Image (cartoon, rainbow, N blue to C red):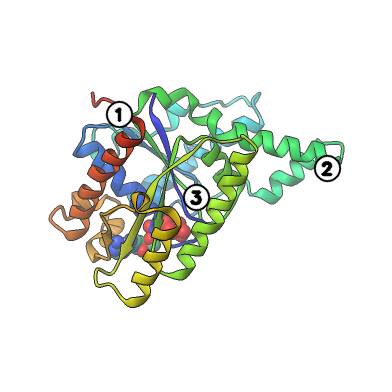
Amino acid sequence: MGYVISIVNMKGGVGKTTLTVNLAASLVKDHGMRVLVVDLDMQVNATLSLMPPLQFAKLKQDNRTLKQLINQVFKPDNDSQSSIKQIIIANICQITGFDLLPGDIELYNDFVLAALIYAHSSKNQLEFEKSWNNLEDYLLKSIIQPVIQDYDFILLDFPPGDYLLTRSGIIASDFYLIPAKPEPLSVVGMGILEGNINQLKDKKRCTISLIGIIFSSLGHSTNMALHVKNRVTAEFGEEQIFNTEIPMNVAIAKAVDESKPVMLTEPRSTGAKAFTELAKEFLQKLSQMTNRLPNPP
Ligand SMILES: Nc1ncnc2c1ncn2[C@@H]1O[C@H](COP(=O)(O)OP(=O)(O)OP(=O)(O)O)[C@@H](O)[C@H]1O
Ligand SMILES: [Mg+2]
C-alpha cells in the first residue's frame, strides 16, 4: 500500500504546488518510486505544471478530470461512469512511473454542497453536520482507494484555505508536509492548519502525522527570516524542520511555463539540485518515522 501525503498550508503562494510536482518527479526519477499527483485545486496549477494547457482543455472537454470522479460520488447511478484508472494520465512528462490525476476548474464549491446536503437533511442541524462530516470522511478516500496499492506515494496538492476537499484529503492521508516561506503570514497559515488537523484528530477522524516543514527562501537570511524560522523551530521542534531549503530560483518558475518539473528543463539549476536533496531528506525522515519504506519496483 502506498503512502498518501498531503502537501498543505492554509496560506496561499507558499510553494505547495511547486513542491508537489518537483518532489514527485525526483521520487520517481532519482529513486524509482511510483508516484501519483492528485490536483485538488480549482486553479489546476499542478495539472498545468505537468501538461500543456491544450492537453488539459481536451481532457476537460472529454470529462476526464477529477470532476467526473467527484460527480460520480454524488450521482453513482449516472450512465457514463469512469474509473479512476481511466482518468489518471500515466507516465506524465514521459517519466515512467509518474502519474497525474488532473484537476478541474469547476469542482463543486462548499456553498453548493452545503445547499445539497441541507436539502436532504430534514433541515436539522445535527443531521446536517453528520452528513457533512460523513462526506468529508468518505469523499477522497473513496476516490483514491482503488489505486492506493498501485503507488508508493500519492501526493495531494491543495488550494489555499480550509475547504471540504482539503479536509477530505487530510483525512485520507497518512502524512503531511508543510511548505512555508520564512515570513509571518506563512506561519499564521501553519497555525490555522495545525488547529484544523488537531480538531480532526480530537474527534478521531484522522491519524495524519507531520513529516516536516520545508522552507523556500531567498538564500540570504534576513533578520525577519531568521526570526520566523526560530519561532517555527521552537514551536514544532528542530526535527520537524527540513535541513534542505528550496532557493528562489528562476529556473523553477520557468519550468512551469514548459509544463515540466525543473529537473527536466534545467537539471543543473540550483532549484533542480535542491529538489534532489529534498527527496533524499524526505525519504530519510519518512523511514525514521515508519521503519518501512515502499520498495522501488
Ligand atoms: N523556489 C522557487 N523559485 C522561484 N519561483 C518559485 C519558487 N517556488 C514557487 N515559485 C513560484 O511562486 C509562485 C507560487 O508558488 P506555488 O504555486 O507553488 O505556490 P502555492 O502555495 O501552490 O500557491 P496557491 O496557494 O495559489 O496554490 C508560482 O508562480 C511559482 O512558480
Ligand atoms: Mg498551488
User: Which image quarter is the N terminus in?
Assistant: top left
Residue at image mark 1: 293
Within-10-Å neighbours for mark 2: few <14, some 14–19, many 20+: few
Callout 2: SS: helix
Residue at the bottom extreme of this rendering: 223
Q: Earlier in the sequence, mark 3 or mark 1?
A: 3
Q: Is residue 221 visible?
A: yes
Q: Amino acid at mark 3?
A: Asp
Q: CA distance from mark 1 to mark 2?
A: 44 Å
Q: Position of residue 105 (x, y in %)?
A: 52, 50
Within-10-Å neighbours for mark 3: few <14, some 14–19, many 20+: many
Distance from mark 3 CB to nearest ligand 2 atom below 8 Å: yes
Callout 1: SS: loop
Residue at image mark 3: 41
144 is higher (above) or lower (below) than 160: above
Q: Position of residue 107 (x, y in %)?
A: 58, 46
Q: Amino acid at mark 2?
A: Gln
Residue at image mark 2: 125
Q: Earlier in the sequence, mark 2 or mark 3?
A: 3
Q: CA distance from mark 3 to mark 1?
A: 28 Å
4 is higher (above) or lower (below) than 42: above
Q: Amino acid at mark 1?
A: Leu
Q: CA distance from mark 2 to mark 3?
A: 29 Å
